[in-house]
Image (cartoon, rainbow, N blue to C red):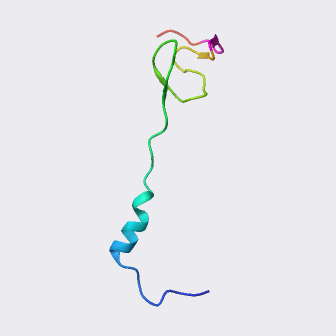
Amino acid sequence: MPNPKRRHSKRRTSQRRAHDHIAAPAMAECPKCGEKKAPHRVCPHCGVYKGREVIEVAEQ
């Protein structure tokens, strides 16, 4: 296996790692209750998906 002849500088390493950050997850607004939820998922607050109730959610 080939090995590097010289070490990479801190700048070169940092530039390569500049895009390795974690992006925030995508969030959509529930059309029924207005809470934030993951797109294409059942709303955990009201239990509605595509305009119909899929799961029952206990009221708090």
Number of on-image labels: 0
Image spot of residue 36 (x, y percent): 46, 24
Magenta: main secondary structure: loop
Residue positioned 41% across, 84% down in the render: 7
Q: Is residue 17 left or right of residue 46?
A: left
Horizontally, residue 4 falls left or right of residue 50, namely left
Horizontal and vertical percent for residue 14? 37, 67
Q: Where does the image place residue 40, in percent across and percent down from the top left? A: 61, 28
Q: Residue furthest left?
A: 11
Residue 22 covered by magenta stretch = no
Residue 32 lies, with reference to residue 20, above or below; the image says above
On the image, the x and y values in percent for residue 28 come to: 49, 27
In the rendered view, would you say 36 is above or below 34? below
Magenta region: 51-56
Q: Which of 2/15 is in front?
A: 15
Q: Quadrant of residue 35?
A: top left
For this view, does 33 lie left or right of residue 41?
Answer: left
Quadrant of the image occupied by residue 44: top right
Q: Is residue 1 above or below residue 19?
A: below
Residue 53 is covered by the magenta coloring: yes
Quadrant holding the N terminus: bottom right
Q: Residue furthest top?
A: 59
Residue occupying the point 58% across, 87% down: 2
- Residue at 64 percent across and 15 percent down: it is 55
Which corner quadrant of the image does residue 6 belong to?
A: bottom left
